[in-house]
Every structure is written in C-alpha cells, then in structure tokens.
C-alpha cells in the first residue's frame, strides 16, 4: 500500500501531522508564534502519483475565523506556479471542525495551501526586478525582529503622495500578488496608466509589511505575535518595528491617498473598507473615498459594493487600524482593500476561484481607477 509523506518545514509552511494511513492523513494547523491565531496552512504531499489522497485538517472550530471554512475549496499545485482548487468539505461536528480535502495528483508531489503562497524568495525577486527599473528607488526602512529587511520602493515625479502597502497579515498572500500586478504596471514604460500616474504622483510602496510572519507561516502576526494592523496608534520597536518604520516615513512624506491591501476569510467578494467614524470625518472627505469606490466598481466586474464590513458610528473608529489612523493623521483618502480566499459569489471561476492572476489584474484596475479619480477630482 502506498504511504504518503507530508512536509511543511519550508518558507511559509504550516501544518502538524497527526497521523498518516496510506493515502489518508489527519492534520492540524499550528498557531502563529506567541499568538492564538491559526488559519493559514501550506504543505507538501509526496508519494501518491495517480492515487486519490484524503487530507483531514481538524480542530478548525478553534481557528481564527471558523466562518471561512464553509464553501471553501483548498488551493493545490503540482508545479508551484499554477494554483487550482480541489473539492473540499467542512464538517463542524467532525473532530472539532474538519476540512476534508480530496485530490488525485498526476505527479509524485503536490502542494496544498489556504491561498496561493507568495514566498519570501519570490518577494526578493519582486523587489530586485522593480528596483532595477529606471526611476525606482529602493529604501530599506528597518530590520525586522527576525533580522529581515523591510523594503519600500519609491517612484514617480508628481506632488500627490500615494502609499500602497500589503501583507500586514502575512497569510493574506492575495495582497502581494496584487502588489506584483501593480508593480508590473507601474514599471512598464509603455503602460499609459503608469506614465500618467508617475507624472502626477510620488509612490511609496511596501509590498510586504510582515516578512517575519510570512516566512514563519503565520496567518496574522509578526515574529512576537503582534497583529500589526492594531498597532498604528502607538507602534513600538519592541512589538511592531514594521509599523513604526512605515508610519515614521509617512510622517516625513505626508499621505494624500493610501491603499492597505488585505484578504478576508469569510466574505466571497472583493470590497473596500473606508474610515467612517474617525474624529475628523467630514462628508467631503468621505465622498472622496466613495467616489473612488464607485469608479473601481464601474471599471471591473471583480469588484462590488454590496458585501463588506459594517461602517463605524460617528467618533467610534478604531484608530489602531491603519486606514483609520492614516485618514485621521493626514486627512488622506485612505482605504482597506479586501480580497477573498474563496471564489466570488457573484462572478465565480470554478477551476481556480479567486486566484493570483485575478489579484494581479485587480492591481492594475485599482491603479487605473486612481488615475481616473485624480483626473476627475
């Protein structure tokens, strides 16, 4: 009888093997270091060419977002380039909540992940390629607690200060796929959207705000269990040096427009969250955000405005969150972009679901929407 092997000791890997019986395995997700967050998984299965494997990830009722599992299909790849979906079923009553993944590999190795991984090696390739382009400056903002560089790319000659930053939550890999698409657009000298934006704007781009959590295979926190998107009011060098370095640099440059890029576990849609409820809220400032939202909704069917987060009441915004802090601190048009782990409910693509390719296309769509927003302001 074939006996599969499962490994996860690699960049962004995360799984605990409870038992293996032939081509069946019982698994569990490890918590983020010094934290109770758990939801991200990424592992390799070998030794099962042509045979169906059944993988049961248990204990998911205690995951960070149990509502993310119903209707979710796991991501799978045999070449680590093209990521498809494979049938998965969640049963809340089996072993504390179990996701059962079924797959028949065509080769001797297959990789499974919560979403298509964006490795730190790929991140360094992205940084190196962008930094080699004419007009692009690489700024090393700080050193993380694990000793990794926190990189920022700057480009453009305009007066509008635009900040794009992603992966405060490292398991939200959609965000860096979006960044790859946005950077491919901005560094293409023949792209008319890029050429127009670079004349109007100075871009400050942090493709990965949380290198440590990314390499460690965390869902939501950095090396010491800190949720970076709850640190923006009072960041510290001990708990959140990443946010401290980014916010200090924002203080130097100012911010006119900002997108903080994320992924959402439960909502099957792409949507924006604004800054309602900040102390300095005005209808005029809010309308700047709503106008961008309307433009993006018109430009791409992958975006919608019906599903999303509830708006904060007047004066009740959480200023520890990036978007609220940036809007309050700088009077900026700031927003959080959320992409799904699942497929879009109103525009599904069954083979891949929401995918790296769609993230990248959305990156360019968001930039094109920004150009129209600037031209019509």
Image (cartoon, rainbow, N blue to C red):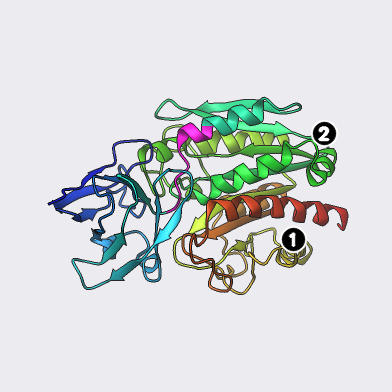
Residue drawn where x is 47% and y is 32% of the image? 121
Quadrant assignment, res 250: top right
- State the SS at label 2: loop
The location of residue 236, given as percent across then percent down, is: 47, 36
Within 10 Å of disc 1 (Cα), the crowding (few <14, some 14-19, many 20+) is many
Would residue 328 be seen by someone viewing this image from the given angle? Answer: no
The location of residue 118, given as percent across then percent down, is: 48, 42
- The question of residue 117 being in magenta is answered with yes
Q: Residue 241: which disc?
A: none
Q: Is residue 173 left or right of residue 246?
A: left
The location of residue 203, given as percent across then percent down, is: 72, 38
The location of residue 41, given as percent across then percent down, is: 34, 50
Residue highlighted by disc 1: 292
Residue highlighted by disc 2: 157
Q: Camera-side residue: 7 or 338?
A: 7
Does 41 sit above or below residue 9?
below
Residue drawn where x is 27% and y is 72% of the image? 91
In space, the residues marked 2 and 1 are separated at their CA atoms by: 22 Å
- State the SS at label 1: helix
Within 10 Å of disc 2 (Cα), the crowding (few <14, some 14-19, many 20+) is some
Q: Which residues are magenta?
A: 115-123
Residue drawn where x is 47% and y is 60% of the image? 341
Residues at discs 2 and 1 in contact (Cβ within 8 Å): no
In which quadrant is the C terminus drawn? bottom right
Quadrant assignment, res 218: top left
Q: Camera-side residue: 353 or 323?
A: 353
Mark 1 or mark 2, which is nearer the start of the sequence? 2
């Amino acid at each position: 009888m074939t006996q599969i092997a499962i490994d996860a000791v690699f960049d962004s890997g995360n799984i605990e093997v409870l038992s293996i019986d032939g081509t069946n395995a019982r698994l569990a997700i490890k918590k983020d270091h010094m934290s109770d967050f758990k939801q991200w998984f990424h592992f390799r299965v070998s030794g099962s060419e042509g045979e169906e494997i059944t993988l049961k990830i248990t204990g998911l009722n205690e995951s960070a977002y149990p509502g993310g599992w119903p209707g979710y299909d796991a991501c799978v790849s045999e070449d680590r380039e093209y990521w498809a979906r494979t049938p998965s079923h969640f049963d809340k009553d089996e072993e504390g909540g179990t996701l059962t993944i079924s797959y028949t590999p065509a080769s001797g190795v297959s990789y499974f992940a919560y979403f298509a991984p964006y490795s730190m090696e790929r991140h360094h390739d992205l940084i190196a390629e962008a930094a080699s382009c004419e007009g692009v400056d690489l700024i090393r903002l700080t050193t993380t607690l694990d000793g990794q560089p926190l990189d920022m790319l700057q480009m453009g000659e305009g007066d509008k200060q635009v900040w794009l930053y992603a992966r405060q939550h490292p398991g939200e890999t959609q965000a860096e796929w979006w960044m790859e698409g946005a950077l491919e657009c901005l560094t293409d000298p023949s792209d008319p959207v890029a050429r127009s934006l670079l004349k109007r704007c100075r871009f400050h781009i942090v493709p990965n705000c949380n290198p440590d959590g990314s390499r460690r295979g965390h869902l939501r926190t950095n090396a010491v269990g800190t949720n970076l998107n709850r640190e923006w009011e009072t960041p510290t060098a001990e708990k959140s040096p990443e946010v401290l370095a980014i916010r200090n640099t924002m203080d130097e440059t100012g911010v006119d427009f900002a997108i903080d890029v994320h992924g959402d576990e439960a909502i099957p849609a792409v949507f924006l969250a604004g800054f309602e409820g900040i102390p300095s809220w005005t209808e005029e400032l809010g309308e700047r955000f709503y106008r961008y939202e309307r433009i993006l909704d018109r430009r791409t069917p992958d975006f919608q405005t019906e599903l999303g987060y509830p708006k904060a009441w007047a004066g009740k915004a959480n200023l520890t969150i990036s978007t609220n802090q940036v809007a309050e601190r700088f009077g900026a048009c700031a927003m959080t972009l959320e992409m799904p782990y699942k497929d879009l409910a109103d525009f599904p693509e069954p083979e891949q679901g929401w995918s790296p390719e769609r993230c990248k296309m959305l990156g360019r769509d968001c930039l094109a929407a920004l150009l129209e927003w600037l031209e019509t302001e």
